[in-house]
Amino acid sequence: MNKLTIKDIDVKNKKVLIRVDFNVPQDKDFKITDDVRIKAALPTIKYCLDKGASKVILMSHLGRPKGKVVDEYRLTPVALKLAVLLGEPVKKLDDCIGELVKKDIEEASERVVLLENLRFYKEEEKNDAEFAKKLASLGELFINDAFGTAHRAHASTEGVTNYLKSAAGFLLTKEIEYLGGALNNPKKPFVLILGGAKVSDKILLIENMLNKADEIIIGGGMCYTFLKAQGKAIGNSKLEPERLDLAKSLLDKAKEKNIKILLPVDNVVSDKIDGTGKVDAVGENIADGLIGVDIGPKTVDKFCEALRNAATIAWNGPLGIFEVDAFSNGSRKVASFLGNLSAIKIIGGGDTAAMIAKFGLEDKMTHISTGGGASLEYMEGKVLPGIAALSDK
Ligand code: AMP
């Protein structure tokens, strides 16, 4: 990896400014309902404290306050939770830039300070240079550990790097290592599993992976556009008619490149997608009025067989409507099979990560990406501004 990481910099006696992702869900009483993102930032924070940083100054966004101070998006509940998880007090400030903020940081007896929500300023998302300079002036070194926003050039992800030596934190380093490294130059054979709702969301991903993968497995809602393109009957399954030509041309391209595309050979169908209808198993073709909601058992076997000897496996998108238990078997069985393989197993963010968590298989995967949009863009082969801007080694 050619970017500086937290291990390459000396934080001793330094004020370290860290961009974290504390964009956590809260209920109506501001109780944090999922603290995974706060926990995920602890290794980087603790490392800086252990290595003698004079101050750890944390900054994050929360929700979409759209450039205005909105009380419900204050980071105060996050600071309280962080203090508990960290086991030491955290000073929460009511602003993120300015002389008062600087003074408060200087005078704080706490080692850890959390700035107020960055997105209370519209300048944050506009990557305003002055705002970035003001943020940078609070620290002496910058660490980015917020992968979820690394695909956006914001003041706190890209702008600040113009003023401070900048390194990747532990979370970001792992994303760069796996999504950037292992997928860019995968150990072969490399098998990609694709699913999820729509073909249109994954076009760039498929195109990029046609240059890297040996086999591509396609399930989920998006497979029906491909099946239809092959002349199969898909009943009332999810179809993007305007993508039929594209699906055909992707299938042709794969053939030219000698890349195997595996599609379902049987399906679980229902007349309703919410699990309240009648559920049935059918073969390759789906009758009118019925919807493909999951891959069938023969397809599970076929997909698992293709995965058995892979050295690298990447997965983006569930193979069925996994949120409904009756439609989750296909995804669950393939995920369990994957769990027992010794390949490098990389799970794309968002829904796919939620699916692996639902199946309780997190520990069986090599890497589960923390970012939804960022993860997809990285797998598409795009340069993420928050990573590109970090200092070179
Ligand atoms: P994505 O965010 O693109 O990975 O899409 C994930 C969503 O795709 C999940 O909410 C699944 O319920 C949905 N999905 C998976 N299989 C199907 C299917 N056969 N029909 C409709 N939606 C599906």
Image (tube, grey):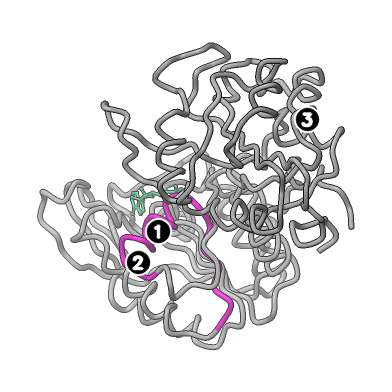
Quadrant in which the N terminus is drawn: bottom right
1 or 2: tag closer to the N-terminus: 1
State if disc 2 and disc 3 touch (CB < 8 Å). Answer: no
The part of the image, by quadrant, that contains residue 284 is bottom left
Q: Which mark is residue 267?
A: none
State if disc 1 and disc 3 touch (CB < 8 Å). Answer: no
- Residue type, label 1: Pro
Other-residue count near label 1 (Cα within 10 Å), few / some / many at <14 / 14–19 / ≥20:
many
How far is mark 3 from mark 2, CA to CA? 45 Å
Q: How far from the left and from the top, in percent, is residue 206?
A: 62, 56
How far is mark 1 from mark 2, CA to CA? 6 Å
Q: Which mark is residue 331?
A: 2
Residue topped by disc 3: 136
3 or 1: tag closer to the N-terminus: 3
Other-residue count near label 3 (Cα within 10 Å), few / some / many at <14 / 14–19 / ≥20:
many
From this viewpoint, which residue is outermost toward the top?
68
3 or 2: tag closer to the N-terminus: 3
Residue 358 belongs to the span the image colors magenta: yes
Q: How far from the left and from the top, in percent, is residue 376?
A: 59, 50
Whether residue 218 sits left or right of residue 255 in the image: it is left
State if disc 2 and disc 1 touch (CB < 8 Å). Answer: yes
| Residue at image location 68% in from the left, 63% down from the top | 210
Q: Which residues are magenta?
A: 343-361
- Residue type, label 3: Ala
Q: Which mark is residue 318?
A: 1
How far is mark 3 from mark 1, CA to CA? 40 Å
| Residue at image location 39% in from the left, 63% down from the top | 356
- Residue type, label 2: Ser
**Callout 1 secondary element:** loop
| Residue at image location 81% in from the left, 56% down from the top | 9
Residue 167 belongs to the span the image colors magenta: no
